[in-house]
Image (tube, rainbow, N blue to C red):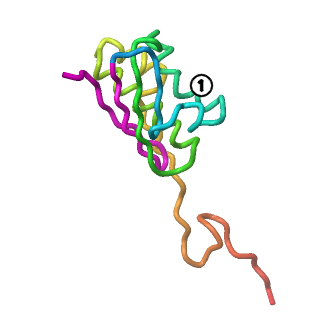
């Protein structure tokens, strides 16, 4: 029987399904290595923050399926998913992850464009004549 902990993370229009399995610290995103999928070092650093906070980077293999949005939003979704999966693994980790802000859903999203306007808030240029 394969033991694993599942959690979902969301950010903007991105949704990440995160599976934590006992292992050696391998991270796979959409069946690719983390370096191949997230090419920017800052995004890879964001993903590892919850695991580094609780000193478990070498304890788990992380398998991630992420869809929607751009790379930055996907990294935010994965961060929340990993933090939630760690809480599913051990509820004693919740205060540390909560105080770091990893369990809080960032509800900011793009505002919709309104009719009669050029964008969400920008108006069409006014001309008197």
Point out the residue furthest to the top here.
55
Q: Dividing the image into 4 quarters, which one contains the N terminus?
A: top left
The answer to which quarter of the image holds residue 24 is top left
The verdict on residue 10 being magenta is yes
- The residue nearer to you, when weighing 118 against 50, is 50
- The residue nearer to you, when weighing 120 against 5, is 5
**Residue 36 percent location from the top left of the image:** 59, 36
Q: Residue at x 79, y 85 (%)?
A: 128
Mark 1 crowdedness (10 Å alpha carbons): few <14, some 14-19, many ≥20: some
Q: Residue at x 43, y 32 (%)?
A: 80
Q: What segment carries the magenta color?
A: 1-21
Q: Residue at x 59, y 25 (%)?
A: 45
Q: Is residue 12 above or below residue 19?
A: below
Q: Residue at x 38, y 16 (%)?
A: 23
Q: Dividing the image into 4 quarters, which one contains the C terminus?
A: bottom right
Point out the residue furthest to the left here.
1
Q: Is residue 114 above or below residue 73?
A: below
**Residue 99 percent location from the top left of the image:** 45, 19
- The residue nearer to you, when weighing 88 against 41, is 41
Magenta stretch prevailing secondary structure: strand
Point out the residue furthest to the bottom here.
129
Q: Which residue is mark 1?
A: 45
């Amino acid at each position: 029987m394969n033991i694993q902990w599942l959690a979902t993370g969301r950010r903007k229009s991105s949704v990440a399904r995160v599976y934590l399995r006992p292992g050696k610290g391998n991270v796979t995103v959409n069946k690719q290595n983390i370096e191949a999928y997230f090419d920017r070092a800052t995004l890879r650093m964001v993903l590892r923050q919850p695991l580094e906070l609780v000193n478990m980077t070498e304890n788990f293999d992380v398998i991630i399926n992420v869809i929607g949005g751009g790379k930055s939003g996907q990294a935010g979704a994965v961060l929340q998913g990993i933090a939630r999966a760690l809480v599913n693994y051990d509820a004693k980790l919740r205060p540390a992850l909560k105080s770091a802000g990893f369990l809080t859903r960032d509800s900011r999203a793009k505002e919709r464009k309104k009719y009669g306007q050029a964008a969400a808030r920008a108006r069409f240029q006014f001309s008197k004549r």
